Image (cartoon, rainbow, N blue to C red):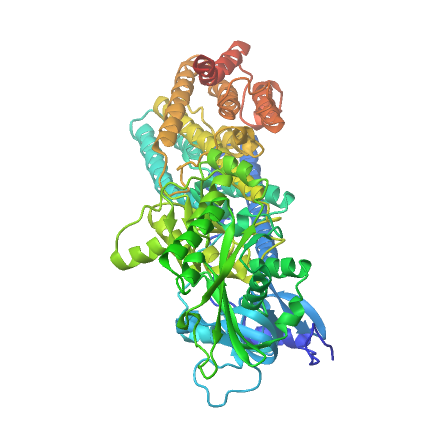
Amino acid sequence: MAQFLNFKGDYKGLSEKKASDNLNMYGNNIFTETEDKSFKSYHYLLDPTAVLLLISGLLQIFTLSQYVTGIMCIIMAIAQTVTLCVICQKNNENIRNRTLSAKMKYRVVRDEILQLIPAAGLVPDDIIIVQGGEIVPADAHILEYVGLTVDESRFTGDNTPVQKHDGADPKATGLKKSCIYAGTRVLNGSAVARVVATGEDTYRARQGEKHGKAADPNFSRYEKTCVKLRLPLAVAAILLCVIGTLSQILTGRTDNVTGVIVSACGWLICMFMPFVELYIRMYNMNFVRRAELKGAVIKNLTVPEKLNSLSVLVIDKSAVVAPNTLEVAGIYSKDTDLMTTVTVLACDKDEPTLAEQAFLLNAALGGTDVATIKRNELTAQFPYNDADRIGGNIYNMGGTHLVCVKGAVEKVTGLCNMSPEEMFRITARAAALAKRGLEVWTVAYYIIPEGEEIPKSLYAVQYNYMGLVSFMNATRDMIPLALQGCKRAGVRLVLTSSDSPETASSMGKKIGLSDAGMISGDEIAESTVTGEPLDYKKAEIFCRVNAAQRVDIIEKLKEAGETVATVGYSDSDYDLVAHADLGITSLENTTGSVYEASGLIVRDDNFSSVVEMIKEARQLHRNIKRCIFILLSTLIAFFCTALADMITGYGIITPMLAAVLTAAVIPLCCTGFRNVKSDIKGNMTPSGFISQGKPDKKFFIRSAVCGLICGAISALFLTLAGGVMSAQQVSSVMLTLLTVMTGAMCLVVTDKRTGAFKNGAIPKYMTVTAAVTSAASVLLPYIPFINSLFGFAVPNPLASIAAVLAGVALPAGLQIKKYLNK
């Protein structure tokens, strides 16, 4: 037997063998299955390029007796298939491993050892330990507990915390006080419990909350768009090639049917849309690795898209103020000693807030015997909360009951016995303090006369005004700088606070926010009743808001078309984080429930870490755009070239040439943008390319125009060269032209600014790749035997020079345009 934490019982737990048997019997503890949209290795066994290469290779061997090129086509087909399968398998393994490592793990006792196990691995009869701030992973019967309260509002609709206990509830129906249920949230305390139901057997599942499969969180919109486009483009390419093939055969332009079919395979390879999703996933995984190097955790591959499209970042006061810096700024009362005593008695005895802790510390340092004061008998307790903005206690002071209250100025003064003039004076003084950025309390008391009943509420009596207490908080040093980074990235920062308008305004101005259009919690409540709309898009500061109103703010911003992220650390931030498009928390300061609801976990609660991730995501998005720009423009250029070959009937675009271009040149060039960082230094506003669901028409038009120009140059060169050289020689120079053109375009689109080579904006990998592939395409046709393997022949050197010049024509023109626009 073994004891754990401060629990009294000894718990052995299941053996690993028994746990394995239970897992086989009951299945994984999965409530909602996740839809698996990942690309499997077997998807690439029928890769169009590999299939076409295989068909053309067999035709060349068995019908045209072209054994060398036929065998090379088959080798290329096998290499293409194996490469795609290996890349796909590695990507899936990396995603699976990272997903598992980012999952919330729970404390489970097995073989007398306390282990951390993902929720999916829990089985009936497991002994689990849960504590405040965690989501309950499975239905369980409580064996032992310490001050356990749970939020069961998802089942009951009532937000009142439920007190739990051990033992049994033989007469209880529905939810039992001696059990905890999957999906509920532990608010306070801790417990040891025995799992009684998992997965579909849980109370949550039986209540009908299960709704099919959840969307695959690692299947991005980029990939969805590419998958949708592939089929119609493939059908169009096949129809066009069939028409071209039949036209050549039926019009009698050639009697070599097999040769035309082989050429058609080459045309199709040029026209088929490449596997763009592999490139996108590769870029996303590169972003994940870079984030991990900075200590961040990306829980799924939709996080980069959300960070890119992010338009509003909602933060609470806790994200602005420096931790552990709250201190008493002043006590304003005619009787400071009595004021201190009343305020100490008004503080929560069990779980004081940060402000209460600061006051208690200040009182102790000032010579007040806090411990002795707290020894008085506590009769009733009314903890402070953001909704009521008032709190206090009732103490029995030697037979006399004293009600001590503290809270927001307008709340407490309204309950005090004072003249309107005095109330105005106190309110004005509190407002003056709040404008300096101080948090202000009003403190009051009431002595219950002998024979009078103990009040059930703090609002049931009329108090004697005692005085004001002000608190000061230091803002984090990096916040103003981080705000500038947000503005550069096109992200609007929104501050929510439970403080008064004056305090919230002062705090907001300290970090560069405007109080123009500031909205209060009272205005939100009134708007809910009257239906009068509020302009949430213009407000940068929200004051006097409670937890429910913070969630409402996020929902209203989302309804207005904003992509909203929020930063949360404590258990009270769970609903806020869960309702945002993207929840963000830190590894150093978070709770289990907030961690589970968040998509991005940064290394610490330094706000600049969040801004850094936004910048990195924006850079990633631009790099993916560059990759897709090259893919689209080269696809259109190859399409035009194949169409020209189809019309002329020269048979220049062979399957081998098409395969070298699409399976070697394009992948090498398109992966070269992974380490481009030039955009981070400039304007990092979000792009509406795909991530917001609204394609950027200008981007696609630019891609199409560049592709058509490149295609026109290539088609014209093919037509002219085909009339004076053999097909093999023209294939050689077309390899040079298209390779040089692709590499040069990659270098040009890497950076919009001039002097990209000098300032190091172009990564070395990209420069080397463009240079090596271009040089190889020029030299390959001149290497004996090697050229024949690929179906090439030695061209005229002047033709190669002309091909290089034609290839750099458009990139050079674009570069000149940069200098002219400088």
The residue that appears at 42% across and 52% down in the rendered structure is 425
The residue that appears at 57% across and 18% down in the rendered structure is 778
Nearest the camera: 764 or 685?
685
Question: How far across and down, in percent of the image, does residue 410 sit?
Answer: 41, 58
Q: Quadrant of the N terminus?
A: bottom right
Question: How far across and down, in percent of the image, does residue 386 sit?
Answer: 46, 60
Q: Is residue 47 visible?
A: no
Left or right: 330, with 277 as reference point: right
Nearest the camera: 434 or 272?
434
The residue that appears at 43% across and 63% down in the rendered structure is 388
Picture quadrant of residue 110: bottom right
Q: Farthest residue in the top direction?
A: 798
Residue 151 vertical placement versus 437 (above, below)? below
Picture quadrant of residue 262: top left
Q: Is residue 818 visible?
A: yes
Residue 9 vertical placement versus 810 (above, below)? below
Nearest the camera: 144 or 111?
144
Question: How far across and down, in percent of the image, does residue 239 sit?
Answer: 33, 37
